Image (spheres, rainbow, N blue to C red):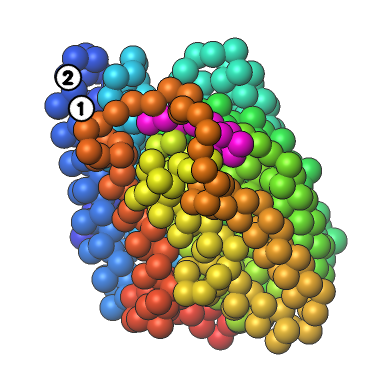
Amino acid sequence: MTAGGALLVGILLSSFVTGCVIFFLPEASYRLRTALNLFGAALKVVLVGVLLVGVRQGGSFAWAFGMGPGIEFALGADANSVLFVTLSSLLWLLTTIYAVGYLEDSPHRSRFFGFFSMCVSATTGLALAANPLTFLAFYELLTVSTLPLLVHRGTRASIRAGKVYLTYTLGAGAVLLLAVAWLHAIVGPVGFVEGGSLAEAAAERPWTFRALFCLFVAAFGVKAALVPLHGWLPQAMVAPAPVSALLHAVAVVKAGAFGIVRLVYDVYGVETAHALGVLEPLAWLAAATIVYGSLRALFQDELKKRLAWSTVSQVSYIALGTAIFGPLATTGAIVHLVHQGIMKITLFFGAGNYAETLGVHRVSEMDAIGRRMPWTTAAFTVGALGMIGIPPFAGYVSKLHLQQGAVAAGADWVGLVLAASSLLNAAYFMPILYRAWFVPREEGWPAEQVFGRAETRGMLLAPPLVTAALVLVCGLFAEAPFSPLSWARLITSLEYP
């Protein structure tokens, strides 16, 4: 095994081994479990940092073993995978800190954190998968490892949500298996290659590859919550706040969006997909999801459900930018994969703090919450303004590039969709901020906990403050050499030779 291969395996095992050990810890081992969680998460960040620098300097990182004739389990690192694995590892560390504080007095913590680590291992494997078969294996592992987190509380609502989630995701896995097997039968082993590798085969059998594209999009569209495959996501909000944060910012929905990015750019190739005529229908589907999700968010009083419908809308920006043929739109799609993650995790951290500290779960209960929890609400405000697309926050950078990409591609209708979406974003976020900061409170909190002079536990407050700072930094320093925007431009330059 080469040093590069060992690094990839080490990144994968840093969370997997941690999770395996945590499963067997007694509930009373709070300090040991916390230390293992934080060590595994910190180690992954360090190893990913080494990988990031190595790929930037042109290093080669690959590892594989054969599973049969023409079948290979393979890991690799390119600019696309490094961006996703960096996002996953950094947000996993912050979510781990948050989850330790959030579940401090909860039962079954060893089980929770064991599956928590398995979930992140699956996400890491998705990021580093070097071919569709390996991607499929980790895609299914993600389903299996996420389900116990979703039903962790064991309530009727969580069990029902788990059944719905399993129905959708197992169906998606079956469709993805069919698509991968069909692709392998037609062209043999296929890897993720910058610029794609199906141009010649697609030119010979265009309708076959159009049908294959539809299968892949259906499979990825479930976890990316594209309409009408989104039904599981709003129900999944019964999960604990750290799980919601993980689902929306790091793991499941991002796995689907990342799958679409890989499909268009690194399996088909954007020029081949454009020539087949499959990008425009994908763009219309993404646009419909953006508008529909925003409209549904308007009418949700439950805070986490409003955020869930916002995710349905916001993740589809990635699919929309991917489906617009042009480098500016590609840059916008890829950078939004990162920006949406840090903005949305900030919002879910805030929602979790309100629920855990004050028993507040609904928008209608949030009057004057900014006065009681000013730091949490300041972080929530930054995340919300970023989602709307107000400068200088990260969301503005994403939307600006998507808008410019649509103009450059001659897709003026996309500009109208983006404008409508931003207005709808403002319509469902600004009332929350107005209530939080400006409406006086006339009654007590539903279930208030007091932590001395602090507004909540330190381990609950620190993560949203860090992610809110990242939302601002990614906007203000978008042109910095190692910024998400700079990395997205690097990827774009490789996809459009």
Question: Which mark is on residue 33?
Answer: 1
Tag 1: Cα neighbours inside 10 Å, few (<14), some, or many (≥20)? many
Q: Quadrant of residue 32?
A: top left
**Left or right of residue 314, residue 134 in this image:** left
Residue in front for this viewpoint, 432 or 326: 432
Instruction: Say if 19 sits above or below 253 in the image.
Output: above
**Left or right of residue 48, residue 360 in this image:** right
The part of the chain drawn in magenta is 355-366
Report x, y in % for residue 246.
Answer: 45, 41
Report x, y in % for residue 143.
Answer: 53, 33
Report x, y in % for residue 103.
Answer: 33, 26
The reply to whether the C-beta atoms of the residues labelled 1 and 2 are less than 8 Å apart is yes
| Residue depicted at x 37% and y 56% | 467
Tell me the element at label 1: helix
Tell me the CA gap for discs 1 and 2: 6 Å
Tell me the element at label 2: loop
Q: Which amino acid does the dot numbered 2 rest on?
A: Ser
